[in-house]
Image (cartoon, coloured by chain):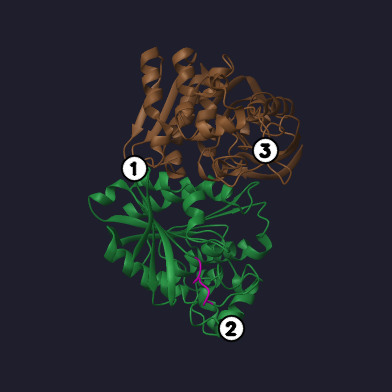
Chain colours: A brown, B green
Amino acid sequence: MKTVSENACFGGVQGVYSHEAETTNCEMTFGLFLPAEAAQGPVPVLWYLSGLTCTHENAMVKAGAQGWAARHGLALVFPDTSPRGAGVADDEAFDLGQGAGFYVNATQDPWRKHFRMWDYVADELPRLLFNGFELDEERQAITGHSMGGHGALTLAMGLPGRFASVSAFSPICHPTQSDWGRKQFTAYLGTDQSGWTGHDASLLMAEHGFGGPVLIDTGTRDQFIDLLMPEALAAAIATRRQPAEFRMQPGYDHSYFFVATFMRDHIKFHADALRD
Amino acid sequence: MKTVSENACFGGVQGVYSHEAETTNCEMTFGLFLPAEAAQGPVPVLWYLSGLTCTHENAMVKAGAQGWAARHGLALVFPDTSPRGAGVADDEAFDLGQGAGFYVNATQDPWRKHFRMWDYVADELPRLLFNGFELDEERQAITGHSMGGHGALTLAMGLPGRFASVSAFSPICHPTQSDWGRKQFTAYLGTDQSGWTGHDASLLMAEHGFGGPVLIDTGTRDQFIDLLMPEALAAAIATRRQPAEFRMQPGYDHSYFFVATFMRDHIKFHADALRD
């Protein structure tokens, strides 16, 4: 593992590190915020999964998360959104290929050699983090934005017991029925849709639910709201009687100004769940 | 004036606007955060001047300022750092020309046609803002980072009575004696150093001081600290008995992670001064 940068930040350290990943078969970069408390021993961890076109960096510099994480003594992990590099398959569209891993393990060519973001985020990166830093594997929570909200919800429901709480900012909620989903699942997972259902938050919510608290925020003026389909997730939450807070925020759009506005609520939500 | 973008943000609006500026003889872009209170009438204003290589955008997305401004009902103005465009003089160095206006009015060719950032920030942009938005001209404060800290301090001391309070993050403190200053002042203002003294915060502090509170933060591990020369400003503050808080922050560097960390303190400091 290589240290790309470390900056003092809210009494802790905002680091950026890279490593050769086995799952994705390329060099991966991630951000890690460690609060001051990490100098004394393992701290709880909040995963933040980013959206389309983002790298590890966007949320790290734009979401305003570190101050609230520092207040609650939480670490923040910012993984990249896909494998990257000259030898990695890509597509001209912004919503397929590099920057658009969709947190699945691709089974189709040309993607399957590198696009194994589920395994990377669920297995390889955690192993690296819990071995290398003062992080408490027993106290994890997860959040994300847009495609990363999809990732947070599907990982949280797909790995029962792993995360104490899950939240999302303007998540892609129902990818098996949206152009943000069908196109990518076809490319990565193939046309047999039986492999898709484990990656659809609304289907997972209807079928399994989540064994902890859930917080979802979406802006009423989100320019991508027809692709996100929050109505599907809201219906699934209500039908299942899932303990959850589902909020439509008046006037907000899909941008990081929206994410930053409600970051305080999300971090407090996770800190409360991790304390219980 | 053209609206480039408007995003809901912490209950208010983060806008970006552009206009044809007479002072700089080109199109200029600025950011303006208006808190919710601006819908009811004029709100106080905090100016944020940015550093080398920055545009109006950097602080607007990375400094984490809007949440605190919203809490105190303050507007935030984010001007650009120089004139820009194909017809505007430039230099290959990152610290001269476009992105490096240094908040002076150039008197030398090829700069004098466009590089009039003092007049732009002191006169033209205020006129536009106070005519176009619900902002209270009688309640203004100013801050900035690095070159923008230099701008904030020199404007505050050069325009007595305009600003209730001034603060700076890792400001360039003594440009007449630093390579961040001598090079640019020679290019923009010429070799006659008598024209330089009105643009040196340490000299202005020694000579005039500031008629309100002053807050300065610099990181002990700032990688540019030898160019910033905070020791000159600290000595001038102490010698003059200027009411001020001058803080060396342990472990912090020159980055926006540092700025974001202490933004809360700075905005509270200005809000208190503007309330008095």
- As helix, strand or loop, the secondary structure at mark 1 comes to loop
- Three-letter code, disc 3: Pro
Q: Please give left or right for residue B203 compared with residue A16 in the image.
A: left
Using the image, name the chain to which the residue with label 3 belongs: A
Give the residue at x 69% y 29%. A125
Using the image, name the chain to which the residue with label 1 belongs: B
Q: Which residue is mark 2?
A: B193
Quadrant of image for the C terminus of chain B: bottom left
Query: Disc number at residue A83?
Result: 3
- As helix, strand or loop, the secondary structure at mark 2 comes to helix
Query: Could you tell me residue A160's position as x and y percent?
Result: 56, 14
Eye-nearest disc, 3 or 2? 3
- As helix, strand or loop, the secondary structure at mark 3 comes to loop
Q: Give a yes or no on whether discs 1 and 2 share a subunit.
A: yes
Query: Could you tell me residue A154's position as x and y percent?
Result: 53, 23
Q: Please give left or right for residue A157 compared with residue B159 in the image.
A: right
